[in-house]
Image (cartoon, grey):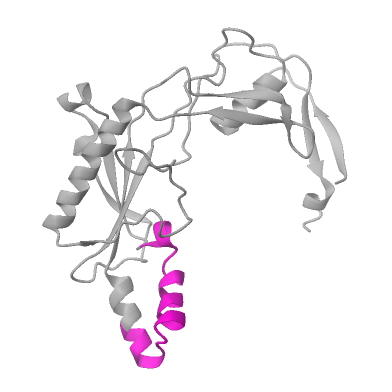
Amino acid sequence: MSYTVEVAKGRVYVLAAHAVENAKLMFASGLGGQGSLIGRNLMDHPALYVWGTAPTPVGPFRGPLSTAGIEELRGGTFRSRHAAFRFDVGNDGWRATTGAPDTTVKGAVMTERLYGSKLRAQLADRLGRQVRFSVAVEQLPNVGNGVSVDPRYRDAFDNPRPVISYSVGEYTLKGMAEASRVYQQILRWARIDDHTNCDGGPYFPSVESSRGIPSAAGHGSASVPKGHAKLNGNARRRRSRRHESGR
């Protein structure tokens, strides 16, 4: 792959490239070293995804992706025992979890062989009753979770790839267990049939644990030094000509 190398120079650099790429850029500039906290304390908010079918239409797929949330469980004395969490009430049916409405249409047509008025009636009923919750769970900082680089791992431009060390601690796992208990109670109260199946689609790859199936939300944060730091060397940007030409 052909590319050009360009050099950008400045007196002040503002890094706004996400927790992972910020740390990688700092390491590539010679910052860090033994005892450095650059890239350490990598955190996300592990998430549980819940989906089911309501007894009556709830009007998904109209308006914003989320229309409400349950915020009362973000704080309280319980945080001495387990992590806090919040519910996001989705307005996108099962899109985030199974790929609906596309997969719902495909199943009705290809598997059930429905068409015409029967297909329209079936889709109106099924899609209109799809419910989705996502539950974001608090994660505490852990210096063992972080971003680093290793000269053995390079990308196609010979830049270092980020090496991620990440785990979910007991405090967060206990919060996930409590969040699971709460969401199951909500489904019972609302008479929503639970269809949660973490093997049901590839849209949110999950990692199994003893207390639930967390997914990474991708909203990461990590430590970076505050104040002034001298970047050793120039910031380099390599651009693929193939990408620039739009092909």
Which residue corresponds to the image point at 28% horizontal and 68% vertical from the top-left?
59
In the image, 214 versus 94, the foreground residue is 214
Residue 84 visible in image: no
**Residue farthest toward the top in the current orientation of the protein:** 35
In the rendered image, which quarter contains the C terminus? bottom right
Q: Say if 234 sits above or below 87 in the image.
A: above
Which residue corresponds to the image point at 48% horizontal and 19% vertical from the top-left?
144
Quarter residue 17 falls in:
top right
Residue 9: percent from the left, percent from the top? 78, 23
Classify residue 186 as left or right of residue 195: left
Residue 79: percent from the left, percent from the top? 22, 25
Which residue corresponds to the image point at 31% horizontal and 32% vertical from the top-left?
173
> Does 114 appear in magenta?
yes
Quarter residue 98 falls in:
bottom left
> Does 16 appear in magenta?
no
* Residue segment shown in magenta: 94-121
**Residue farthest toward the bottom in the current orientation of the protein:** 116
Residue 167 visible in image: yes
* Most common secondary structure along the magenta stretch: helix
Classify residue 12 as left or right of residue 40: right
In the image, 146 versus 11, the foreground residue is 146
Which residue corresponds to the image point at 47% horizontal and 55% vertical from the top-left?
203
Residue 38: percent from the left, percent from the top? 57, 17
